[in-house]
Image (cartoon, rainbow, N blue to C red):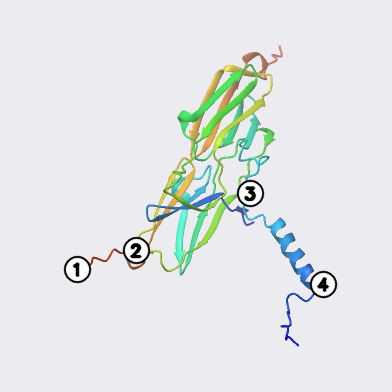
Amino acid sequence: MDLVRWNQRGNLNPMDEFDRLQEEINKLFNLDYQSSGIFDRTASPAVDVIEKDDSVVVRCDMPGVKKDNLDLSLARNILTIKGEKESEDHENESKNYRNETWSGIFQRTISLPDSVDPEKVEASLRDGVLELVIGKREEVKPRQIDVKVS
Amino acid sequence: MERRCVSPLSRIHEEGGKVYLQMEMPGVKKDNVNVSIEDNQLRINAPRHEEEVQGNYIVRERNCADFEKVFTIDNSIDRNSIDASLVEGVLTITLQFKEEVKPRKIKIRG
């Protein structure tokens, strides 16, 4: 009679399955880094739009994007931010260990409050954050009217 | 209250015998980045002091938490030649291998 090795792992142990399931769940909840899936914010950069009394401020995170690769346009109150984040991959020379970053072309269109004035826009790119300050039209600015009491 | 920390999106790659650790840290100023090394842990901490705009937020998607990341590096990395730079919101840390672990060419006499 042949001796068959008793296979400890192979023996059906229902608890093993639970361990495996637990691992899968842990993986699912391992939100150590944001995934760079297609619906992720990295592909369409995250923005903040803040309305002030006399202007609208738009802030947008774009690390690694060069000034020349940004294209901003404002048509009435529709702001379009287009740009490209260049890939730094030099194909053959570099060996990637881990890459969570994203590169490519992105576009974001935001509708701003109607009161913005497309003529008064200031944009700056600092430390990977794009900041746009868009003035409001004179006629819609809240104006203080003094009432004289005679 | 302790400020919230997030791990920056990073990319680790090797090129020309050097290892580059790149982390996306939008809104972080150069002076605020702390890189420290203790035993085999390379810790990067970057508080994001961004001036709050007073006003009414119509859209708020950006996460304004501080950045923190710890890398474990092994003994083949030269602790004395670590270089860091911050350009356009991307922090790049350059690590070099120690001389003794670099592949060496041995000449054949004769």
Residue matched to label 1: B109
Determine whether label 1 and label 3 are within 8 Å by CB.
Answer: no
Q: Is residue B105 left or right of residue B87?
A: left
Q: Position of residue A121 (x, y in %)?
A: 55, 22
In the image, residue A122 sits, relative to residue A126, either above or below, namely above
Q: Residue furthest bottom?
A: A1
Q: What whole-number distance in Å separates the C-alpha atoms at marks 4 and 1?
A: 64 Å
Q: Residue at x 55, y 19 (%)?
A: A120
Q: Position of residue A1 (x, y in %)?
A: 76, 88
In the image, residue A132 sits, relative to residue B23, either above or below, namely above
Residue closest to the eye, A30 or B105: B105
Residue at disc 3, secondary structure = loop
Q: What whole-number distance in Å separates the C-alpha atoms at marks 2 and 1?
A: 19 Å
Q: Residue at x 50, y 60 (%)?
A: B43
Q: Residues within 10 Å of mark 3 (few under 14, many from 20)?
A: some
Q: Residues within 10 Å of mark 2 (few under 14, many from 20)?
A: few
Examine the image and state in which quarter residue A118 appears.
top right
Count of number-bearing discs: 4
Residue matched to label 4: A14
Where does the C terminus of chain B fall, quadrant-wise? bottom left
Residue B103 numbered mark, or none: 2
Residue at disc 4, secondary structure = helix
Determine whether label 4 and label 2 are within 8 Å by CB.
Answer: no
Q: What whole-number distance in Å separates the C-alpha atoms at marks 3 and 2?
A: 36 Å
Mark 4 falls within which chain? A
Q: What whole-number distance in Å separates the C-alpha atoms at marks 1 and 3?
A: 55 Å
Q: Residue furthest left?
A: B110
What amino acid is labelled 3 in the image? Gln
Q: Residue furthest right?
A: A14
Mark 3 falls within which chain? A
Residue matched to label 3: A34
Examine the image and state in which quarter residue A30 appears.
bottom right
